[in-house]
Image: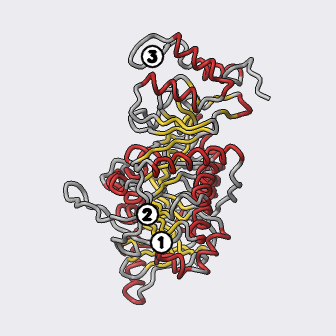
Amino acid sequence: MSNIVFFTEVANYTEEIMQSSGNYPVLTAEEVVSGIKDGDTVAFSGFTPAGAAKAVPSALAEYAREEHSKGRSFKVRVLTGASSGQSVDEKLANAGAIEWRAPYQTGVELRRQINRQEVEYVDMHLSHLPQTVAFGFFGQVNLAVIEASEITPDGRVYLTTSIGASPSYLRCAEKVVIEINTRQSQRLREIADIIIMPPPPKRNPIQIYDPMTRIGLPYAVVDPKKVIGVVESDEPDYLAEFTPPDRISRQIAGHVVNFLIDEMRAGRIPDTFLPLQAGVGNVANGVMAALGAHPDIPDFKMYSEVLQDSIVDLITEGRLVGASATSLTVTSEKLKQIIDNFDYYVPRIVLRPQEISNHPAIIRRLGVIAMNTALEADIYGNVNSSHVYGMDIMNGIGGSGEFTRNSYLSILMTPSIAKGGKISSIVPMCPHIDNNEHSVQIIVTEQGLADLRCLGPMQRAKVMIEKCAHPAYKEYLERYVKESRVAHISHDLVKCFELHRNLMEYGAMLPDLDIT
């Protein structure tokens, strides 16, 4: 059966079933996959592994292997809300089924394929994604596969543990499949707050004046005629357990907490505090735990994009009184805790589309304090969060740029060294820059905190070396500044990437350095 005939027949069958019983046809994942063509653009739900489609990507990976074994080409263009972990990125990458990927990823094998230029990767700000899709810059989205707990005959789709870009995919995709996940609680709809932005210039101010303001609906909407059917699933979100914060993370957290307390005492943060945003990972978890434990930090709220296990603990303790995000990226244990005590958590958690959770106007209006991680920073305050050597992708920029550029305070955090001292996170010049000196205000390592606000370039260099660089690299960085060409921003264009070249050639930025 041809792909066009398949989709047409199933769509007709859908209309007949709806007219008679109000139900959508139940399809197997394999039936859905048989209608996907080589080169199609497929959009999957999921923002991190939370709420990611599961059954169809698995079947799609197996179908790709079968096609390749027969000597036939088969790859698809993949869209999600952000990364989608094992269920999408890793399964499809391991099957050689991805031709093109956007807007963000964290897959180990997919990363390798991108860096070998086997997969084309578009790394972009996450709030830009829905508009980019809506205006067709990615071309036609041929199929959207969206996880939900329910779809009604009139096209109301109740999403699960993430909202992400799913509302936009439901609206823009040519055809839609809904993965009904019976494992996910139907009560999750009670924390959803979904709106779709109209196209410019018909946009009014978004009426969110507090992180917990609700302005939308508990469901997304799809034209029922586009829904070719539902696929049943009961798989959990595949989320790895988070490791407890290590010593370095705790030291970084201590510097951040002390800085924020000093800002409060100076009157630059109100006594009621300001909403927080925190990135994903060990360092961010450590900072949030430290903030919650410190008696001088008042109870606070979050306006962020991802809620992790540490956030659930803070809500449980009453330290975090409300949290807005687009994804509930928690382990199975924490998700069960939320579901079992939903009456407590419902008024304290809101999930929104990523276009809203990461919207610059809201971030700026609320005065968000943004805390994100970096791979490296240079002595003038430019930050690289995504590329090793400025060439090899790690994950991507994600939402860090939107929060760093528009927050009241932008804080970027990184350990001062990595790989036992073979790598310095403070370098003369970043070979790739995600967040530049004009947006970055505060940089923190376990060595200390550099407040770069209102400092000129040479003052920034001095503070960065003094406060953030590891002692083993300070002499090199000081000598670099001294020997560079005198200018507004002093650099030596011959030596500015010497540390990175050494790392590529010798496996260490300073080959003779011994840090025991």
Marks 1 & 2, CB-CB < 8 Å contact: yes
Q: CA distance from mark 1 to mark 3?
A: 52 Å
Helix, strand, or loop for circle 3?
loop
Earlier-in-chain disc, 1 versus 2 = 1
Badge 3: few (under 14), some or many (20 or more) residues near its Cα, within 10 Å? some
Pick whichever of labels 1 and 3 is earlier in the sequence.
Answer: 1
Q: How is the image coloured?
A: secondary structure
The type of residue carrying mark 2 is Ser
Q: x%, y% of residue 154?
A: 36, 80
Precedes in sequence: disc 3 or disc 2: 2
Residue 514 position within the rendered picture, expressed as x and y whole percent measured from the top left = 77, 23
Q: CA–CA distance between discs 1 and 2?
A: 8 Å
Residue 262, above or below 338? above
Quarter of the figure with the C terminus: top right
Mark carried by residue 166: 2
Q: Which structural element holds mark 2?
A: helix
User: Of 444 and 235, which appears nearest the observer?
Assistant: 444
The residue at the far right in this view is 516
Residue 468, image quadrant: top right
Q: What amino acid does circle 1 point to? A: Leu
Q: Which mark is residue 159?
A: 1
| Label 1 close to label 3 by CB (< 8 Å) | no
The residue shown at (37%, 47%) is 406
* Nearest the eye: 245 or 129: 245
Classify mark 1: residues with Cα within 10 Å, few (<14), some (14-19) or many (20+).
Answer: many
